[in-house]
Image (cartoon, rainbow, N blue to C red):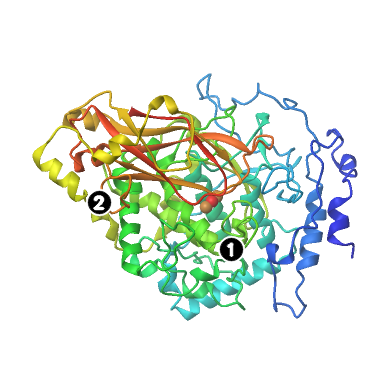
């Protein structure tokens, strides 16, 4: 067997014979994979077929198979704009993203400039015709997703799930249904492998925009059906990591047996004990917070990101993203911000890039990824039941954005966002669970509670006044706690005005390096020397970057923003009649610098 290194590092010039349309210059030097340690790609098919760990073969064979799809310097615009409006009913200016280009797939990397290059492309899509998505027949049994901590106690279920995962891990690595290929799907759509089919000069990114929820729902749909088909069980459903309930916050038992195909060795060992709840406000330092503290803060954060901060769809789903737009990077809606910490918290704390869960390129290699995302998906449904303005988008481009997946028959399927908005139509259900965070509306600190009662004019703590940064200091590198006064265009808004539009605090021009963890928190009218946590109303939100590569030609730096709906917050801290608010940015342990462009108030309807 040729060694892995020689397979990857030799120039793949033979691809030209297969796809002669392509040009042959390398767009970037292909680095060596020598830095790849076996443990970093722990995709094993252990003890399933009597062979010893076939991992090296798996990787090498798969790399060889999929190297055929590596794009070698395809020039911008070769398949350029012009033909992207295909639906006769579409408006003349419709711009739905029409999936990734089937002819282009680049090597991915966790960090630009790093010699570690990863083959994330699926088996040859070029020249292959995709089939349109078909809904499961209504006569198919429902797939009922259950909470992982409860399903862990159901022996029969756990055995089924393990068998399905084992079979998936043991499929030949070039099989698009294999664990290896399925894990790559996430990397390809996230770490710069794909370009938009209508704009091959632009990367395709499925995080940080309104595509986040529908894309991951599709991914789970195919993944789950593949698992079910491998054990001939049409009722098979993935479990969900019920981290929004105190009983389900820890990693479920079934994922912890090192002998099980549900195990992944690249997780943070400090977070495996069954009394360790996922901490949605983990600072990457503190490991000894009491359970109750974490639970209550988690509930308050879920409340913020599902209720008070997610009153309108733009805030919940994230920014709009259409064909021809550069790939979004960072930020994202509250549904995505709510999901980020589980990645960082679960991933290996001593791995170079946070593998597996802590980096988007490798997250799909941990079986728990899919279980985490089932909860995210479930919370999308829950959000729509909360009421108010919580609806799906009905934008043409949104509904018609499409992606490509291989299904349980290894057919290449083109699926659109509009296909997945109704979970029922997908034959999917979630077991009902209590939602304890629904009533976790934060409470104001004593200072603001008193203020609410007396309706005093704005004062704020005297020490804070002295430390206030002038708005002209922006852009500024956020290195220390920074307080600034932000004017409100309207004050004393009536109930009618508030229902017509939410008041959004925007942190603009957040500039950072995509492959670095960056985090900070935002509080309003609070004591900068002792900033509040999520259980207090003064806490407006937080920013966290999960390392990834910005999918646009490897640019590592990007600029993003953070939007926080503070309509309810301002009521709770008695600031509705103020002409300005005092905003404090509190940096948390980060691995790279972050620059803040400015702060402003906006209205969102
Ligand atoms: Cu595509 Cu949790 O990420």
Q: Is residue 81 visible?
A: yes
- Taking the spot 74% from the left edge, 42% from the top edge, the residue there is 106
Q: Position of residue 21 (x, y in %)?
A: 84, 33
Looking at the figure, which quarter contains the N terminus?
A: bottom right
Q: Position of residue 348 (x, y in %)?
A: 59, 63
Q: Nearer the viewer, residue 559 or 67?
A: 559
Q: Tally the marks.
A: 2
Q: Is residue 356 left or right of residue 104?
A: left
Answer few, some or many: residues within 10 Å of disc 1's Cα (few below 14, many 20 plus, some between 14 and 19).
many
Q: Is residue 203 left or right of residue 87?
A: right
Q: Position of residue 99 (x, y in %)?
A: 62, 38
Q: Is residue 343 above or below residue 256?
A: above
- Taking the spot 57% from the left edge, 33% from the top edge, the residue there is 97
Q: Position of residue 214 (x, y in %)?
A: 49, 45
The quadrant where residue 167 appears? bottom right
Dot 2 or dot 1, earlier in sequence: 1
Gap in angstroms between the C-alphas marked 2 and 1: 32 Å
Q: Are marks 2 and 1 in contact (CB under 8 Å)?
A: no
Is ligand 1 closer than 8 angstroms to the Cβ of mark 1?
A: no
Q: Is residue 451 above or below residue 187?
A: above
Residue that lies at the very extreme toward the left in this rendered image = 454
- Reading the image, the residue beneath label 2 is 442
Q: Nearer the viewer, residue 529 or 497?
A: 529
Q: Is residue 231 visible?
A: no
Looking at the figure, which quarter contains the C terminus?
A: top left
Q: Is residue 106 left or right of residue 7?
A: left
- Reading the image, the residue beneath label 1 is 348
Is ligand 1 closer than 8 angstroms to the Cβ of mark 2?
A: no
Q: Nearer the viewer, residue 310 or 329?
A: 329
Q: Is residue 554 left or right of residue 23?
A: left
Describe the element under mark 1 as helix, strand or loop. loop
Answer few, some or many: residues within 10 Å of disc 2's Cα (few below 14, many 20 plus, some between 14 and 19).
many
């Amino acid at each position: 067997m040729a060694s892995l290194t020689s397979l990857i590092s030799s120039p793949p010039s033979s691809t030209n014979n297969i796809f002669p349309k392509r040009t042959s210059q390398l767009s970037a030097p292909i680095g060596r994979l020598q830095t790849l340690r076996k443990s970093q790609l722990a995709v094993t098919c252990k003890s399933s077929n009597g062979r010893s760990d076939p991992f090296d073969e798996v990787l090498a064979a798969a790399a060889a198979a999929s190297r055929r799809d590596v794009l070698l310097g395809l020039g911008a615009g070769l398949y350029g704009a012009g033909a992207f409006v295909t639906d006769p009913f579409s408006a003349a200016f419709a711009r739905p993203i029409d999936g990734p280009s089937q002819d282009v797939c680049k090597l991915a990397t966790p960090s630009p400039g790093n010699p570690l290059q990863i083959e994330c492309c699926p088996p040859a899509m070029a020249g292959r015709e995709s089939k349109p998505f078909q809904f499961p027949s209504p006569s198919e049994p429902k797939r009922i997703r259950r909470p992982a901590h409860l399903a862990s106690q159901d022996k029969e279920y756990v055995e089924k799930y393990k068998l399905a995962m084992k079979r998936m891990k043991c499929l030949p690595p070039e099989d698009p249904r294999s664990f290896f290929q399925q894990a790559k799907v996430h990397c390809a759509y996230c770490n710069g492998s794909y370009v938009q089919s209508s704009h091959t000069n632009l990367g395709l990114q499925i995080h940080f925009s309104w595509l986040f929820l529908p894309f991951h729902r599709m991914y789970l749909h195919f993944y789950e059906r593949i698992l079910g088909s491998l054990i001939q069980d049409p009722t098979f459903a993935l479990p969900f990591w019920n981290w929004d309930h105190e009983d389900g916050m820890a990693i479920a038992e079934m994922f912890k047996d090192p002998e099980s195909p549900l195990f992944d060795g690249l997780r943070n060992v400090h977070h495996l004990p069954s009394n360790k709840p996922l901490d949605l406000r983990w600072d990457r330092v503190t490991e000894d917070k009491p359970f109750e503290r974490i639970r209550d803060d988690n509930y308050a954060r879920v409340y913020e990101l599902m209720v008070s901060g997610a009153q309108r769809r733009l805030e919940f789903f994230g920014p709009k993203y259409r064909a021809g737009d550069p790939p979004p990077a960072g930020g994202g809606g509250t549904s995505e911000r709510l999901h980020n910490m589980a990645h960082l918290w679960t991933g290996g704390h001593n791995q170079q890039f946070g593998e597996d869960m802590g980096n988007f390129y490798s997250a799909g290699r941990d079986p728990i990824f899919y279980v985490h995302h089932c909860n995210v998906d479930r919370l999308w449904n829950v959000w729509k039941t909360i009421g108010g303005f919580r609806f799906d988008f009905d934008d043409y481009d949104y509904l018609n954005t499409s992606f490509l997946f291989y299904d349980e028959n290894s057919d290449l399927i083109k699926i659109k966002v509009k296909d997945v908005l109704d979970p029922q139509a997908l034959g999917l259900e979630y077991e009902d669970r209590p939602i304890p965070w629904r009533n976790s509306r934060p409470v104001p600190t004593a200072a603001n509670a008193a203020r609410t009662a007396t309706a005093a004019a704005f004062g704020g703590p005297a020490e804070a006044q002295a430390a206030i940064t002038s708005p002209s200091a922006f852009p500024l590198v956020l290195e220390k706690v920074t307080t600034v006064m932000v004017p409100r265009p309207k004050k004393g808004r009536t109930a009618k005005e508030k229902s017509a539009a939410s008041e959004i605090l925007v942190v603009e021009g957040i500039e950072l390096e995509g492959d670095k963890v960056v985090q900070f928190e935002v509080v309003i009218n609070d004591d900068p020397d002792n900033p509040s946590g999520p259980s207090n109303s003064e806490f407006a939100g937080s920013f966290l970057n999960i390392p990834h590569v910005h999918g646009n030609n490897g640019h590592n730096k990007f600029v993003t923003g953070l939007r926080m709906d503070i309509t309810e917050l301002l009521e709770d801290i008695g600031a509705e009649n103020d002409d300005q608010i005092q905003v404090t940015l509190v940096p948390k342990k980060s691995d790279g610098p972050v620059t803040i462009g400015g702060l402003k108030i906006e209205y969102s309807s």
